[in-house]
């Protein structure tokens, strides 16, 4: 596939639906893919049964979008933030702070929040990033257990080392339960200048070489080992509780190693082992940062008076919260292929009655890609098309005011690689009265010929939001 990030100038096409057009983005996470020999050399979007996406592409206009700025990893936190028009160089702080916002944890200025997966290790390798499809109710038991048996002793040790009186509460580390395998680790005084390995990018790889390290720049520049000096270098007020990058990496690695001993002994994992099931036997923190500073979408686009985000994923909810969108939680939304597509569709339809902007995110396609499950990803694409997009389009066509629809992924998650890759993604835009551009199907190849050409980062949202205004 052509992965050249060449930016094409895009015309306006004279698209002028009625003023006051509402906007909805429907995003299939990791939906785009590569050509697969088992499919006769077709990509999954080419092979999937998705008549509604194909109809919208045929009646609308298409293009491709670069969603990952140079120098950033092709993660969902990066791509979704960029799709909404934010400059990652200004607002990026990793997944942790975004998921903290979604969970409802109000970060203090000296908090370092980092995503904390519960994963499966076997024979010295990362087997799954999701702890064997861990359910939230089981994960909550494990998180409580880790706070009691892992965090509490470390907090007591740190309190004594810092000379803090026993009467003063001090929590160096705490685990906060999120959804399924996706949780949060908060380190008081932690330093973000560390290198972590996203577990979904390293399936079947040895885990020890992937342990946390300080950033090279902090090592090469002689980042002080003393936490007081490190505080000054990192731009924080001098504080003996502030950790250096090396100290932060050492602490996280200690948590990883000790979690493995503790989780192996927990009745939940003992039961799984007896049944021959994958164990949720290690934490794996990655993608951390400090509290971000972001303008809302309403501040950037005055035509948006109110908006909503619909997603089962904490990360996306957190992005939406910082973007000023109200979070709509749909019962039965799981982040997997068994999610409540119909519930999400109905929530989006109801939101369009009161809100100007709706962002609907579906995780199922990404999870299938990470699992390397071709058939499941094909089904997830079909479910998204028929059980979510189709009812939304049918409802929109009956509304008394125009609605502009966009469909796209955030990044590819190829089933044969099982990781995110940094390549342009196909997108379509449809609204009443739009002049088609001749593209007949929605897929990675067809959209190359789309009238929008190749857009980059915030060009997509600027083009999308200019329609009808």
Image (spheres, rainbow, N blue to C red):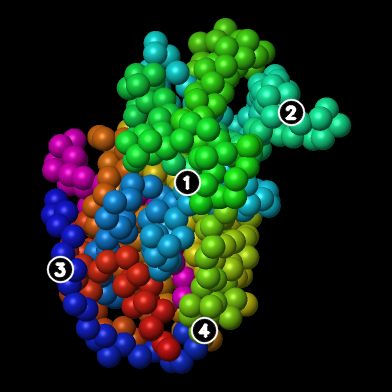
Q: Measured along the vertical axis of the image, is residue 202 above or below residue 318? A: above
The image shows residue 173 at horizontal and vertical percentages of 65, 32
The residue identified by callout 1 is 233
The image shows residue 445 at horizontal and vertical percentages of 17, 58
Q: How many C-alpha atoms fall within 10 Å of the one at disc 4: few (<14), some, or many (≥20)? A: few
Picture residue at 51% right of the left edge, 30% below the top: 247
Q: How many C-alpha atoms fall within 10 Å of the one at disc 3: few (<14), some, or many (≥20)? A: some
Which numbered dot is residue 449?
Answer: 3
Q: Please indicate whether residue 218 sits to the left or right of residue 130 in the image.
A: left
Residue 450 in view, yes or no: no
Determine the image quadrant of residue 37. Answer: top left
Picture residue at 16% right of the left edge, 54% below the top: 3
Q: What's drawn in magenta, residue-wise?
A: 23-50
Q: Please indicate whether residue 270 sits to the left or right of residue 16 in the image.
A: right
**Cα separation between marks 4 and 1:** 39 Å
**Cα separation between marks 1 and 2:** 23 Å
The residue identified by callout 2 is 163
Which numbered dot is residue 302?
Answer: 4
Q: How many C-alpha atoms fall within 10 Å of the one at disc 2: few (<14), some, or many (≥20)? A: few
């Amino acid at each position: 596939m052509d992965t050249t990030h060449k930016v094409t100038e895009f015309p306006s096409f004279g698209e002028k639906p009625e003023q006051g057009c509402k906007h909805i983005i429907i995003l299939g996470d990791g939906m785009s893919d590569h050509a697969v020999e088992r499919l006769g050399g077709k990509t999954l979007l080419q092979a999937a049964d998705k008549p509604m996406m194909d109809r919208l592409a045929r009646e609308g206009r298409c293009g491709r979008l670069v969603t990952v700025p140079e120098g950033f990893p092709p993660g969902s936190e990066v791509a979704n933030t960029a799709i909404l028009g934010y400059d990652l160089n200004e607002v990026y702080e990793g997944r942790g702070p975004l998921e903290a916002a979604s969970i409802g944890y109000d970060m203090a200025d000296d908090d370092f929040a980092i995503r904390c997966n519960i994963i499966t290790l076997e024979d010295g390798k990362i087997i799954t990033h999701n702890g064997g499809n861990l359910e939230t109710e089981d994960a909550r038991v494990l998180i409580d257990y880790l706070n009691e048996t892992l965090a509490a002793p470390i907090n007591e040790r740190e309190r004594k080392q810092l000379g803090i009186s026993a009467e003063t509460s001090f929590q160096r580390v705490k685990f906060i339960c999120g959804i399924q395998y996706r949780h949060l680790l908060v380190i008081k005084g932690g330093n973000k200048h560390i290198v972590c390995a996203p577990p979904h990018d390293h399936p079947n790889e040895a885990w020890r070489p992937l342990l946390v390290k300080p950033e090279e720049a902090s090592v090469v520049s002689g980042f002080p080992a003393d936490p007081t000096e490190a505080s000054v270098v990192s731009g924080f007020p001098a504080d003996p509780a502030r950790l250096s990058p090396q100290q932060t990496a050492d602490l996280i690695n200690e948590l990883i190693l000790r979690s493995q001993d503790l989780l192996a002994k927990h009745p939940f994992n003992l039961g799984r082992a007896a049944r021959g099931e994958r164990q949720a036997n290690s934490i794996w923190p990655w993608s951390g940062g400090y509290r971000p500073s972001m303008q809302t979408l309403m501040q950037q686009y005055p035509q948006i008076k109110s908006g909503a985000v619909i997603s089962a994923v904490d990360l996306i909810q957190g992005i939406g919260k910082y973007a000023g969108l109200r979070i709509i939680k749909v019962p039965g939304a799981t982040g997997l292929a068994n999610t409540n597509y119909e519930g999400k569709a109905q929530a989006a339809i109801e939101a369009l009655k009161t809100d100007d902007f709706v962002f609907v995110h579906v995780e199922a396609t990404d999870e299938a890609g990470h699992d390397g499950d071709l058939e499941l990803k094909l089904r997830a694409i079909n479910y998204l098309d028929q059980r979510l997009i189709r009812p939304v389009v049918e409802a929109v066509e009956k509304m008394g005011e125009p609605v502009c629809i966009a469909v796209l992924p955030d990044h590819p998650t190829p089933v044969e690689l099982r990781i995110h890759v940094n390549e342009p993604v196909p997108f379509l835009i449809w609204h009443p009265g739009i002049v088609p551009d001749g593209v007949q199907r929605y897929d990675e190849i067809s959209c190359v010929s789309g009238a929008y050409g190749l857009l980059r980062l915030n060009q997509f949202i600027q083009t999308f939001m200019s329609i009808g205004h």
